[in-house]
Image (cartoon, coloured by chain):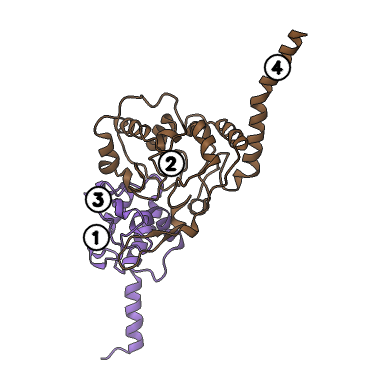
């Protein structure tokens, strides 16, 4: 039996929609612009205004391979507790004092949107 | 006659500082408030931080050195290379290059005459930090030690956002090569220990530094006095 093309497209959309948001949360974008852009950059590719002064280059959030390999809970821990919480650079600070757990979850979803990767 | 003259002089002398303060307070309340909070804001949102036009001044009397303030207000220099909120001034880098600062997005600080600058500096020094924010004597005034510059530049990441010398370091935070002339050491200890006590949404992170590191870094910053008033 052959699946109708429109039905197949709808099924594909549904599957993609299960993990990747079609539109980013406006609040997550504001959080990213306030705290993350200084190092991760306007293009979200690790080339922020501070990046030339950093010994370790900030993560490129548009890198689908590296981001796709990183589970949600690692992204959550890195934002909440900083690089040291996930065995990475001290230059990624902890944000738990200024970004709530719920907001960090929104940022993880936003990172999936930016990197065009699925939740893991 | 002589005594009456003396009394009159004493009364005039006593009246001078409050008069100067009142003039400075008028300027603060009529002009500075357009960009700065001179009273502690009730709560703060990310939106307010993104839109901020100038740093908070509600604890200015515990933060700044008065001589520096009076000199800077007459001849303001750029303290924050990317403006009061960096995110509004950065432009995307092209082709993998780092972001840059759009000079058109930066607002120069108004320049005051000598009398107004002195009056505003006096008024700002009256704005002491609220109870519990800046502990007097928190800075122990021990020598910074040989590791302090390394802590600043490498180990604790301060140089990612701040400069310890002109043209070096990151740009999202204020320059620190003038910190020793500009800032009070007890304030530096308090702010670095917990920046979110001053502004719960500011983009300066909490750095989990040890008390010993905070003393070393503060002692180091106090040695950086580029452009100090003579």
Whole-percent x, y for residue A2 in the image: 27, 91
What residue sits 67% from the left and 20% below the top?
A: B13
Which mark is in front, 4 or 2? 4
Residue A111 in view, yes or no: yes
Q: Which mark is residue A85?
A: none
Which mark is in front, 4 or 1? 4
Whole-percent x, y for residue B112 in the image: 59, 42
Which chain is rendered purple in the image? A
Q: In this image, B79 relative to B40: left or right?
A: left
Q: Are marks 3 and 2 on the same chain?
A: no
Q: Counting residues from the N terminus, which is met first, the one under dot 4 or under dot 2?
A: 4
Circle 4/circle 2 CB separation < 8 Å: no
Q: Nearer the viewer, residue B129 or B77?
A: B77
Q: Residues within 10 Å of mark 1 (few under 14, many from 20)?
A: some
Measure how far apart labels 1 and 3 are at the Cα level: 22 Å
Q: Which residue has dot 1 on it?
A: A70
Subunit of label 4 = B
Q: Which residue has dot 2 on it?
A: B196
Give the SS element for disc 1: loop
Q: Which residue has dot 4 on it?
A: B9
Q: Are marks 4 and 2 on the same chain?
A: yes
Subunit of label 3 = A
Please name the color used to draw chain B: brown
Q: Counting residues from the N terminus, which is met first, the one under dot 1 or under dot 3?
A: 3
Whole-percent x, y for residue A18 in the image: 34, 70
């Amino acid at each position: 039996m052959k699946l109708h093309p429109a039905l197949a497209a709808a099924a594909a959309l549904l599957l993609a929609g299960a993990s990747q948001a079609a539109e980013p949360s406006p609040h997550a974008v504001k959080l990213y612009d306030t705290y993350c852009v200084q190092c991760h950059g306007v293009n979200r590719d690790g080339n922020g205004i501070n990046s030339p002064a950093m010994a370790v280059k900030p993560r490129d959030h548009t890198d689908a391979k590296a981001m796709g390999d990183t589970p949600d809970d690692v992204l959550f821990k890195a934002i909440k507790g900083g690089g040291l919480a996930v065995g990475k650079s001290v230059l990624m600070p902890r944000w738990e004092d200024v970004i709530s757990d719920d907001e960090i979850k929104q940022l993880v979803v936003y990172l999936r949107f930016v990197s065009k990767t699925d939740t893991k | 006659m002589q005594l009456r003259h003396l009394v009159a002089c004493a009364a005039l002398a006593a009246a001078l500082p409050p008069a100067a303060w009142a003039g400075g307070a008028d300027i603060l309340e009529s002009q500075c408030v357009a960009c700065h909070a001179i009273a502690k804001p009730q709560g703060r949102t990310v939106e307010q931080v993104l839109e901020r036009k100038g740093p908070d001044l509600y604890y200015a009397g515990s933060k700044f050195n008065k001589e520096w303030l009076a000199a800077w207000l007459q001849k303001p220099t750029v303290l924050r290379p990317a403006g009061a909120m960096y995110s509004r001034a950065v432009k995307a880098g092209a082709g993998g290059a780092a972001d840059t600062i759009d000079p058109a997005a930066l607002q120069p600080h108004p320049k005051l005459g000598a009398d107004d600058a002195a009056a505003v500096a006096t008024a700002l020094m009256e704005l002491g930090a609220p109870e519990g924010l800046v502990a007097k004597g928190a800075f122990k005034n021990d020598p910074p030690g040989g590791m302090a510059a390394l802590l600043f530049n490498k180990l604790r990441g301060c140089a990612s956002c701040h400069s310890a010398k002109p043209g070096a370091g990151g740009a999202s935070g204020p320059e620190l090569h003038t910190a020793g002339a500009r800032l009070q050491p007890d304030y530096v200890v308090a702010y670095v220990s917990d920046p979110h006590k001053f502004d719960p949404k500011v983009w300066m992170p909490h750095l989990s530094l040890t008390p010993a590191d905070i003393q070393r870094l503060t002692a180091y910053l106090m040695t950086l006095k580029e452009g100090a008033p003579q």
